[in-house]
Amino acid sequence: MDSPTLSSSVVKAVSATVGFDACGLAEATALAPGEYRLDDWIAHGYHADMHYMEQYRDLRADPRVLHPGTRTVISVLLGYKPSRRMEGPARIAQYAYGEDYHQRVKRMLYQLISVLRTHYPDFEACPCVDTAPISDKLWAARAGLGWIGRNTLLVNPTLGSYCFIGELVTTSPADRYDTALPNRCADCHRCLQACPNHCLQPAAGTSSTWLDARRCASYHSIENRAPQLPPSVQLSGYAFGCDCCQLACPYNQAAPVRFTLTDERKSQLEALADADATAFKRFAKHSALNRIRYYQWLRNMQHNRDIHPNKT
């Protein structure tokens, strides 16, 4: 059975009806060495102890290895900038204010497949939401949805870096593929200057940056499983993740609100500072907070108290 040729305009129109903020299509070919510098990043030790990043490198570089016969990568964005930010001694990165994005975006991707099948009955695709070895940011950039900013995140001209990324990997070709956008960070270095741990490091031989996870508050508050964090690490009041570099980005400051933080949800988030293990686990079950364990949550709050005893 031949895979149907997709109309780029139809795919984008359908993605909008499903609720995605942006959609782009890229031809599935191997990422070029200049795009894909994972080996260099790992060689510098910037992945800390995230050893899973050392695996499946060939799959990350070429979706045709992950899914043989792949012809097209359809990338979608869903903005998440909140209407306001939470307060209190245990702040949470803004992307985790709502429902776990893995669940939400995956559900929307299945809806996208379902609606596309009304146009193309033989359409087949594999949905990916940060759960498969595919380079989400790089494919979104290839699909013309933004560029890799100095904060090492995808920056969309409208949504900034406040966006979730998902893909449909499909054997269907498209009638037209999108063109990558030029980097528009220009001479702005606000994200580098905003990081309290100086985790954004110059990438050798390029004008871009690498994120050194060994210095990053998000890494330490989420991925680091140690009972104590290095005293030199500043969490800046965050108990899960960090938004320091994103808050400084002009594109994020101008981005439209895509998530309404209600009084009820804000109160729930702020109440986690006093939650016991049962309450924390119950809340985290359908939140991105399910990435960490309760002892990490307590550890992070204690670290903030130890480093800034007068600010919590």
Image: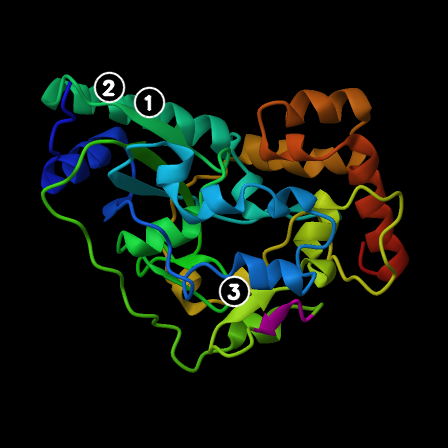
Position of residue 287 measured from the top left corner of the image (x, y, whole percent): 58, 30
CB within 8 Å, label 2 to label 1: yes
Dot 1: what SS? helix
Dot 2: what SS? helix
For badge 1, the amino acid type reads: Tyr
Q: Residues within 10 Å of mark 1 (few under 14, many from 20)?
A: some
**Magenta portion: prevailing SS class:** strand
Name which residue lies at 78% across and 29% down. Answer: 275
Position of residue 189 measured from the top left corner of the image (x, y, whole percent): 51, 77
Q: Residue 60 in magenta?
A: no
Q: Which residues are magenta?
A: 198-202
Residue under numbered circle 3:
151
Residue closer to the observer: 172 or 13: 172
Inter-mark Cα distance, 2 to 1: 6 Å
Q: Residues within 10 Å of mark 3 (few under 14, many from 20)?
A: many
**Residue 81 visible in the current orientation:** no
Residue 110: mark in rendering: 1
For badge 3, the amino acid type reads: Asn
Q: Quadrant of the N terminus?
A: top left
Dot 3: what SS? loop
Using the rendered view, name the quadrant where residue 138 is placed: bottom left
For badge 2, the amino acid type reads: Ser
Residue closer to the observer: 217 or 251: 217
Residue closer to the observer: 12 or 18: 12
Name which residue lies at 82% across and 26% down. Answer: 276
Inter-mark Cα distance, 2 to 3: 35 Å
**Rendered view: 173 above or below 198:** above
Pointer 2 or 3: first along the chain: 2
Going by the image, does 78 lie left or right of 95? left
